[in-house]
Image (tube, grey):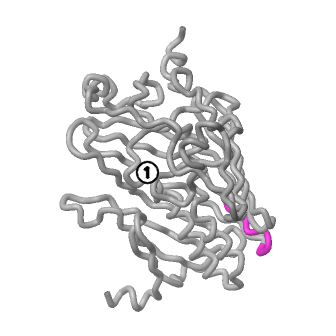
């Protein structure tokens, strides 16, 4: 067995039916994108209420293992500075989901795309797209478990009639692990696609995940294409203390049709936590004139004001 075949956790624990097509949805704690209840999920069935509305599960079919009896340091002390996808990790550190299911959570706030499609003003469309891009990482808050690496060629499909989209993702590379996805509106008003190559590194007290890959959103009615990359995610206190997550880095959302650009800075926590979860940025036109300012928290909400009002704060 060569060194590249030693680590992939998909070979040690991913026998779940969730990504085989029996379940056509994904789970997210505290979100609206949930699946059928635990018993229905275990039977591979989708519940239907008396009024005919489909009911999606609210819990995973299997709980996560408790980590209290495991020594994290005994494993991670050998990994400092290394890329974690090359390290064998016990499944106790995984959440019972495939990464293909995890990226489906990007679509939780699809209503922001639908809202963008209805606006005639390109500035308002950019605001909605920016909100959608930020909301795509909001599900990572308090998510400290690592999803399983999918097998090469594994797929996951999801269709949500009430949200107006269908989604498919596939593991297109195993060395390195790369996941590709494609989503489209049921009304054929948008297409959202991209690929993700997550780079994970351990820095002693924290684990950093850099989600390499470009997201592309096409608003078909307006003949517009927006692209951006996601910020870096960092899990702190992996050795001792309470685990907590922050996102940091700058992302640029570009409208390739109009030349407008939205620049968002996910601020690092800082020494006293004053900037924790804070996002600040602006939208500018193709002439680099600032049209509005954006601020808020990626875990809560975003606000948009004109530059003069923002400067007066």
Q: Of helix, strand and loop, which one carries label 1?
A: strand
Residue lying at 42% horizontally and 36% vertically, measured from the top left: 64
Q: In which image quadrant can residue 248 be found? A: bottom left
Q: What residue would you read off at disc 1?
A: 232
Nearest the viewer among 93 and 8 is 93
Q: In which image quadrant can residue 43 be found? A: top right
In percent of width and height, residue 160 lies at 69, 58
Q: Which residues are magenta?
A: 217-222
Classed neighbour count for the residue bearing mark 1: other residues with Cα under 10 Å, few (<14), some (14–19), many (≥20): many
Above or below: residue 82 compared with residue 139: above
Image side of residue 201 versus residue 159, left or right: left
Q: Quadrant of the C terminus?
A: bottom left
In percent of width and height, residue 299 lies at 40, 64
In percent of width and height, residue 85 lies at 47, 30
Is 282 contained in the magenta span? no
Residue lying at 71% horizontally and 84% vertically, measured from the top left: 120
Residue lying at 54% horizontally and 17% vertically, measured from the top left: 5
Image side of residue 51 versus residue 214, left or right: right
Q: Quadrant of the N terminus?
A: top right
């Amino acid at each position: 067995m060569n060194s590249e075949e030693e680590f992939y956790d998909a070979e040690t624990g991913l026998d779940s039916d969730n990504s085989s097509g029996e379940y056509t949805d994904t789970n997210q704690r505290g979100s609206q994108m949930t699946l059928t209840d635990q018993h229905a999920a275990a039977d591979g069935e989708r519940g239907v209420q008396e009024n005919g509305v489909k009911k999606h599960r609210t819990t995973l079919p299997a709980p996560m293992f408790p980590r209290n009896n495991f020594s994290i340091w005994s494993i991670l002390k050998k990994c400092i500075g290394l890329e974690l996808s090359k390290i064998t990790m016990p499944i106790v550190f995984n959440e019972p989901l495939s990464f293909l299911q995890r990226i489906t959570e990007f679509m939780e706030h699809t209503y922001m795309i639908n809202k963008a499609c209805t606006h005639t003003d390109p500035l308002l469309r950019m605001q909605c797209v920016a909100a959608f891009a930020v909301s795509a990482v909001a599900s990572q808050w308090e998510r400290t478990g690592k999803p399983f690496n999918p097998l090469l060629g594994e797929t996951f499909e999801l269709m949500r009639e009430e949200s107006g989209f269908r989604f498919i993702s596939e593991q297109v590379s195993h060395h390195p692990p790369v996941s590709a996805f494609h989503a489209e509106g049921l009304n054929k008003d948008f297409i959202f696609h991209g690929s993700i190559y997550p780079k994970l590194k351990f820095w002693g007290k924290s684990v950093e995940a850099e989600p390499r890959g470009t997201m592309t959103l096409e608003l078909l009615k307006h003949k517009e294409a927006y692209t951006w990359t996601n910020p870096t995610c960092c899990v702190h206190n992996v050795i001792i203390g309470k685990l907590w997550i922050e996102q940091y880095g700058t992302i640029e959302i570009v409208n390739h049709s109009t030349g407008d650009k939205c620049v968002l800075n996910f601020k690092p926590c800082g020494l006293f936590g004053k900037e924790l979860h804070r996002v600040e940025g602006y939208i500018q036109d193709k002439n680099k004139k600032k049209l509005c300012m954006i601020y808020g928290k990626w875990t809560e909400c975003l606000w948009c004001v004109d530059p003069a009002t923002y400067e007066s704060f």
